[in-house]
Image (cartoon, rainbow, N blue to C red):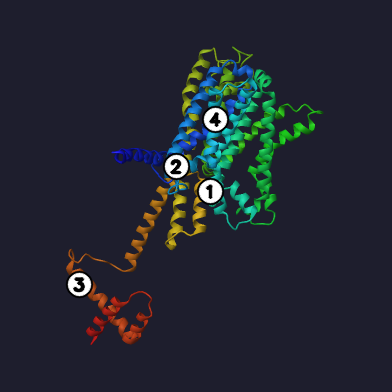
Amino acid sequence: MTEHAHKPQTSLLALAYQWLFDPEFKHGFNHTVERCIAFLIVASVFAVLIENTPEIYNSYAGWFHWFDVITVGIFTVEYVMRVATAHLHPDFAGKSMPRLRYALSFYALVDLIAIAPFYFARFVDVDVEMLRVLRIMRLARMFKLSRQIIPAWREFQELNQGRTFRAKVFALLEPTGHSGRLHAYLDNFIVFWVALSIFCVIFESVASMRALFAVEFHVIDVMAFTIFTIEYIARVYSAPENPKYHHRMARWAHIRSGPAIIDLLAILPFVLESLLSQHVDLRFLRVFRLVRMLKLTRYTSALETLYKVVQREWQVIFASVFVMMLLVVLTASLGFLLEHEAQPDKFENIPQSIYWAIITLASVGYGDISPITPMGRALTVVLALVGIGIFAIPAGLLASAFTDQLRIDRDAFKQRLMLAFEDGMLNGAERELIIAEAERLHLSHEEVTRLTNEARAEFAAKEAENHTHANGLVLDAKAHPALAAAQFKLLVDQLSLIAQATGEDALRKSLAHIKTDSQAELDVLAIVAKRHL
């Protein structure tokens, strides 16, 4: 009875491990669990930092407490489940005392340290200083991210064995096919600091927030500047590894490129503020730091796709913009003629009327300038109705062209896959190019799999069609027996002519030297020889 009762428990643990922690199980939630845990780690670290601000913590102490309780509860459940299913983990399966071995491993100790301060403060009497130390120790939850980073680092080392340090740096910064997950983590890290620095610049303009977090804003700005500077230097250093630069001045070509100029502008305001703040009022440079938002364009293909759309459809877009400008000028002129006498202060001249025409055509209508004459109001009604269609033309063109460009990019990716399948298999270089292209287009794993299957099916169909054309017409003997017999006779006559021209002995020797099994060909040759005799 005991052994029979133990089986359902083992089955439940196996299912829990498979669905929650097994990265090889495609239908499981391992990636979702990892992302949620990573989000909670970052959020809890921010909560610990904000708790050091009494003005905020005192007002929302209850919210901070319950957030800490929920976070620790989730981390505790994760820790217990990982220990309970340790015997199913590949690194501990088959070993003696697998749960104890896992509990003493690096990852398990990190998970334990992340929750230990909470329980220690609840069940042990501590003084104020010790409680403050325990709160600070909660920052150790950041080390839980090592569960994703360390395996990604090992994968990166395996993928880049034998490559130079410069090539490894380039693989970290750009998708190369051998960058692995570590490249994605680094991209997310930089995107996080871009978003955080922008967030700080925006809230630093609020006097009350600046008074509370002046030190924190400065520290974050210094750290963001350091990270962006290291990134800029690393990109310049690894520029010769970029396939786009085939000449000797690769670094200079990179420095002059658009993304590199954006990277430089992202760090330049901090340098100018530090060097010239004592002599010149450079407070406007703090707002200029918002140019860091342009760094995000490197991590999405949307801007590149939009550039292709504008480049391809510029004639149509120019025509629609020309019609809009023509209508704006004509409308402003009519508005000036109809309303100038009634409102000389608002419709003083045509340039001022252009402002009214634009906001009317755009169907915005702020109300600061509006006609009061009957003809002027009638013109406004017509303009408002016309503006809905006129301003919708460029939007519709861009939306349609944008969708079309996405389809073109995916078709080009499928064509690249078909070219890679020409030799029957994907080699390492072709696989790296395909992975890099998929990362550039930001295709999901499901989309890549679907396009790969479609390319393989189309290539197989094309090969079958070529094989059919190469072998001539093939008829169904049951459906067309007479035509099939005539075709067979024609083929035999052709083989007989080949045997006569080449010679039976020479043809047999040639067939014997073929590496594949040629017994069938020899049998056919014997039949043709008998027919010839």
Crowding near the residue tagged with mark 1, few <14, some 14–19, many ≥20 C-alpha atoms within 10 Å: many
Amino acid type indicated by mark 1: Gly
The label nearer to you, 4 versus 3, is 4
- Give me the C-alpha separation between circle 1 and circle 3: 59 Å
For this orientation, the residue located farthest to the front is 2
Secondary structure at numbered mark 4: helix
Earlier in the chain: of badge 4 and badge 3, it is 4
Mark 1 or 3 closer to N-term? 1
Kind of residue indicated by mark 2? Ala
Q: Which mark is residue 180?
A: 1
Q: Position of residue 408 (x, y in %)?
A: 46, 47
Q: CA distance from mark 4 to mark 3?
A: 86 Å
Q: Quadrant of residue 371?
A: top right
- From the top left corner, tell me how far across and down residue 191 is, in percent: 58, 37
Q: Residue at x 42, y 62 (%)?
A: 424
Q: CA distance from mark 2 to mark 1?
A: 26 Å
- Looking at the rendered image, the quarter that the C terminus falls into is bottom left
Q: Pointer 2: what residue? A: 86
Amino acid marked by disc 3: Ala
From the image, tell me which residue sits under label 3. 485
> Can you give x and y, in whole percent of width and height, for residue 16 in the image?
39, 38
Q: Which mark is residue 116?
A: 4
Q: Which SS class for mark 2?
A: helix
State which tag comes first along the sequence, 2 or 1: 2
The secondary element bearing badge 1 is classed as helix
Q: Amino acid at mark 4?
A: Ala
Q: Nearer the viewer, mark 4 or mark 1?
A: 4
Rate crowding at label 3 as few (under 14), some (14 to 19) or many (20 or more) other CA atoms within 10 Å: few
Earlier-in-chain disc, 3 versus 2: 2
